[in-house]
């Protein structure tokens, strides 16, 4: 946000394209040199939240591999933060989150399918019983 | 649509930024696996059952695949974007499958209700039919009993055969009057669970001993006839009771005629009547 504002400010004051390009280049180099990489706190929090949601949906029963993967990556992301590898940390946090999302989606799909299968089974049982009953009488 | 294009542009911008930053000598290449992700997404998008069932997730997957398809200097970033795209597609597939299951549930529920209704209807029909049969059987029995001219007593149904069945002093059944006995044998053959007691009775004319013998013989004749008609011997008992159980006075001819008789007691069964 701050960067964008700065760029806008620069764009506003320097009308000539050459000046603008120079200003942007200077700004980029400054950012590259001066910025201390920040830990991807937002991504880490999002990953953790999604893992918790998956946990609540009993994803461990239906997608334990995916859930385990999400946890492993979250731990790896935190370890990367410790080593100040912030880009890696962010990527791992993002991956952890989609793993957890996948675990959740898989668990929901499996549960929905199980309900349908159960319904189908009970319908079949009823039909079979009916056929057996009529068979007896004939 | 505009926001989609904006998001798309934004994604490209985000993806391209590191490329601009990187001052590498090697040219950017399309990340490995991006094509596979694209194929997988196309498969989902062309699945008639799933494509329409998770529009948001499929759109997210589409954006992720586009991001992954952008050539990258950084191999690690390329891998990351391909992984993200692949996962987003899988998520979309599962979400669509969940939705499909939910949509199918209505139909399944209807099918189950129909099956349940069918079986209930059939059960009710069967019960109704069974009740009708039972009713019919009870009516038949009533009719048969009425035809026998039987009287309901404490001992069971009593059919009284008059002495017209026999010649005076004889125990042989008269050929012309056995229609009544045929009804009885028919009834016993239809109702196998009933047994009969046959009792012979006389008036007080003649010696007691000869009357006892005659009554026994006449009872035996009736029993023999029933056995001949197919009634199993184990279901029949015959007694000669002689003159000791009159049903009328022995003073008048009419009274004596009433006393000369064979009584057939059809025993009540526990289950019916």
Image (cartoon, helix red, strand yellow):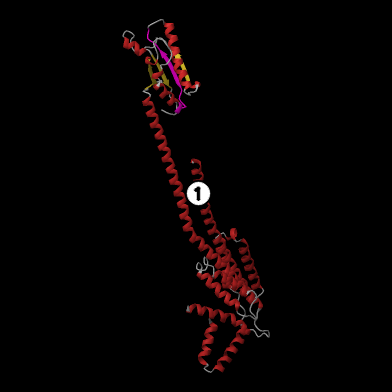
Instruction: Check the image and report above or below for B255 versus A69.
Output: above
Q: Which residues are magenta?
A: B189-204
State the residue at coordinates (38%, 26%).
B145
Residue A94 at x, y = what percent? 59, 71
Instruction: Check the image and report above or below for B16 versus A116.
Output: below
Q: Can residue B247 be seen in this snapshot?
A: no
Q: Residue B164 versus residue B148: which sits nearer the camera?
A: B164
* Residue assigned mark 1: A127
Residue B45 at x, y = what percent? 54, 70
State the residue at coordinates (47%, 57%).
B107
In the visual, does B150 lie left or right of B65?
left
Secondary structure of the residue carrying tag 1 is: helix
Q: Quadrant of residue A57?
A: bottom right
Residue A122 at x, y = what percent? 51, 51
Q: Residue furthest top?
A: B207
Q: Is residue B245 magenta?
A: no
Count how many numbered circles sit on residues in the image.
1
């Amino acid at each position: 946000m701050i960067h964008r504002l700065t760029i806008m400010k620069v764009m506003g004051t320097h009308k000539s394209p050459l000046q603008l390009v120079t200003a942007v280049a200077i700004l980029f180099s400054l950012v590259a040199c001066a910025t201390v990489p920040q830990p991807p706190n937002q991504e880490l929090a999002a990953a953790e939240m999604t893992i918790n949601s998956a946990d609540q949906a009993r994803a461990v029963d239906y997608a334990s591999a995916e859930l385990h993967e999400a946890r492993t990556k979250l731990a790896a992301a935190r370890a990367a933060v410790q080593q100040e590898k912030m880009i890696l940390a962010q990527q791992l946090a993002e991956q952890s989150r989609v793993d957890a999302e996948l675990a959740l989606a898989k668990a929901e799909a499996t549960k929905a399918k199980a309900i349908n299968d159960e319904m189908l089974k009970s319908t079949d049982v009823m039909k079979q019983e009916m056929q057996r009953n009529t068979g007896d009488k004939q | 649509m505009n926001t989609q294009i904006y998001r798309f542009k934004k994604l490209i911008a985000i993806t391209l930024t590191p490329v601009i930053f990187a001052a590498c000598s090697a040219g950017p290449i399309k990340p490995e696996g991006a094509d596979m992700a694209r194929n997988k997404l196309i498969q989902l998008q062309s699945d008639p059952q799933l494509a329409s069932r998770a529009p948001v997730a499929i759109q997210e997957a589409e954006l992720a695949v586009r991001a992954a398809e952008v050539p990258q200097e950084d191999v690690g970033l390329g891998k990351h974007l391909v992984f993200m795209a692949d996962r987003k597609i899988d998520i979309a597939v599962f979400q669509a499958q969940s939705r499909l299951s939910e949509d199918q549930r209505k139909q399944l529920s209807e099918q189950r209700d129909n099956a349940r209704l069918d079986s209930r209807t059939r059960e009710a029909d069967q019960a109704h039919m069974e009740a009708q049969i039972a009713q019919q059987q009870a009516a038949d029995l009533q009719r048969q009993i009425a035809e026998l001219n039987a009287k309901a007593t404490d001992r069971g149904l009593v059919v009284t055969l008059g002495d017209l069945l026999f010649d005076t002093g004889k125990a042989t059944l008269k050929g012309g009057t056995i229609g009544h006995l045929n009804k009885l044998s028919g009834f016993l053959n239809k109702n196998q669970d009933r047994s009969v007691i046959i009792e012979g009775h006389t008036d007080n004319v003649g010696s007691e001993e000869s009357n006892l013998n005659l009554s026994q013989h006449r009872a035996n004749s009736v029993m023999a006839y029933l056995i001949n008609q197919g009634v199993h011997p184990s279901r029949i008992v015959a007694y000669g009771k002689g003159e000791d159980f009159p049903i009328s006075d022995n003073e008048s001819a009419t009274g004596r005629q009433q006393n000369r008789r064979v009584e057939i007691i059809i025993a009540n069964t526990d289950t019916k009547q």
